[in-house]
Amino acid sequence: VRLILATGGPGMVRAAYSSGKPAIGVGAGNGPAYIHHSADVSKAVSCIARSKNFDYGTVCASEQSIIVEKSMEQQVRNEAQKQGFYFMNTQEAGSLAKLLFRPDGSLNPKIVGKKAELLAQMAGFEVPRDTKILVAREQEAGPTRPYSMEKLCPVLAFFVMEDEDAVLS
């Protein structure tokens, strides 16, 4: 095993972290999708789209972020755009981030289960009518980075790592 992906309660995540293997641990409902360089990119993106768009992302098991190696970035972006993903610019992502979470850091219930197009309108920008998922480029994860948090709507973070070792470390 080269990587453990642990989703669930604190005990499961703690066990994964103490296993001695690289681990990505998330609480219930904040799972990442790592698109490996050997993946069928079209199929991987399609699966993520289907999962994240089902019930407009309210299922806590749906992906919250996509992680790719730098060499895969453009291929994944191109395929995702073909399949209705909209990669927000910095200003749009900032506007949406303010809408997603309240000042105290809790999720804004007004965004839960809303269509991507409606979320964009609520944040003050327009997207193509066929937009299924809004995507924000993110540099790091943590409590001050809203796109690394659970978002119960069709919104994803997009992380680009230098290589597989960086993804797994």
Image (tube, rainbow, N blue to C red):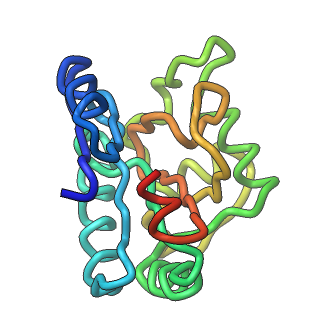
**Residue 148 drawn at (x, y percent):** 53, 40
Q: Please indicate whether residue 82 sits to the left or right of residue 137 in the image.
A: left
Q: Is residue 145 left or right of residue 45?
A: right
User: Considering only vertical position in the picture, is 106 above or below 15?
Assistant: above
- Which of these two is toward me, 36 or 104? 36
Query: Relative to 60, does residue 67 appear above or below in the rendering?
Result: below
Q: Position of residue 56 (x, y in %)?
A: 33, 50
Q: Nearer the viewer, residue 14 or 108?
A: 14
In the rendered image, residue 46, in percent from the top left (x then y), is placed at 29, 76
Question: Which quadrant is home to the N terminus?
Answer: bottom left
Quarter of the image where one finds residue 8: top left
Q: Residue furthest front?
A: 20
Residue 79 percent across, percent down from the top left: 45, 86
Q: Residue at x 48, y 80 (%)?
A: 76
Number of numbered discs visible in the structure rendering: 0
Which residue extends farthest top?
104
Residue at image point 45% right, 69% down = 164
Residue at image x 42%, y 52%?
Answer: 154
Above or below for 107 versus 6: above
Vertically, is 78 above or below 109?
A: below
Dividing the picture into quadrants, the one containing residue 42 is bottom left
Please state which of residues 166 and 79 is positioned toward the viewer in this rendering.
166
